[in-house]
Amino acid sequence: MLFYATLIFTVAAIGGVYMAHRILNGELAPWAVSLLHAGLGAVGLVMTTLAVMAGAGGPVMGPMTLITLLIAALGGFYLASIHMKKRVASSGLIVTHASVAITGVLFLIGIAFLFDTLTHSLHSDVNNLKGVLQKSK
């Protein structure tokens, strides 16, 4: 499920880059792209929430990933409220939202593709060490 969440967030990011380009040039982003970006972000967030609730990412990385993505979503809601007033958001807000979202997606990639491998490797090392210690007794 995390693979698909990562894919969905990546597609959402493409729309985000397009909107950021428009906004940083002083233009409003098209509503269709804004709604698609928000919808994909919401789907990715729900998928991530379900996976973390099922134990993905362990007791630290999973919740940290989810909290980071939730903060990015709150920033996105704030940006949408500015858009609804037909105002262009400040570049600082755009960069902050993008930075938090990218950080969350990088954490997501970590738990989707690296966490299980590292955890499995660590458990194997611990089991090997236990075997060595038992043989030495």
Image: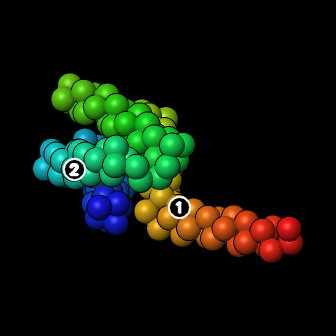
Q: Quadrant of residue 12?
A: bottom left
Q: Is residue 86 left or right of residue 96?
A: left
Q: Is residue 91 left or right of residue 41?
A: right
**Element class at badge 2:** helix
Question: Which quadrant: the N terminus?
Answer: bottom left
Check disc 2 and report the residue beneath it. 43
Q: Quadrant of residue 80?
A: top left
Outermost residue toward the left in this view? 32
Q: Is residue 17 above or below residue 74?
A: below
The picture places residue 68, in percent across and down from the top left corner, at: 46, 40
* Label 1 crowd (10 A; few <14 / some 14-19 / many >=20): some
| Residue at 49 percent of width and 49 percent of height | 58
| Residue at 20 percent of width and 25 percent of height | 85
Q: Is residue 82 above or below residue 109?
A: above
| Residue at 43 percent of width and 37 percent of height | 67
Q: How many badges with numbers are in the image?
A: 2
The picture places residue 89, in percent across and down from the top left corner, at: 36, 33
Amino acid carrying mark 2 in the image: Val
* Residue 17 in view here: yes
Q: First in sequence, mark 1 or 2: give its number.
A: 2
Outermost residue toward the right in this view? 136
Question: Which quadrant: the C terminus?
Answer: bottom right
Amino acid carrying mark 1 in the image: Phe
Between 127 and 20, the residue placed more toward the observer is 127
* Residue 37 in view here: no
Between 43 and 24, the residue placed more toward the observer is 43
| Residue at 13 percent of width and 50 percent of height | 32
Between 56 and 97, the residue placed more toward the observer is 56
The picture places residue 122, in percent across and down from the top left corner, at: 64, 65
**Element class at badge 1:** helix
Check disc 1 and report the residue beneath it. 115
Real-space CA distance between mark 1 and mark 2, rounded to the nearest whole angstrom: 22 Å
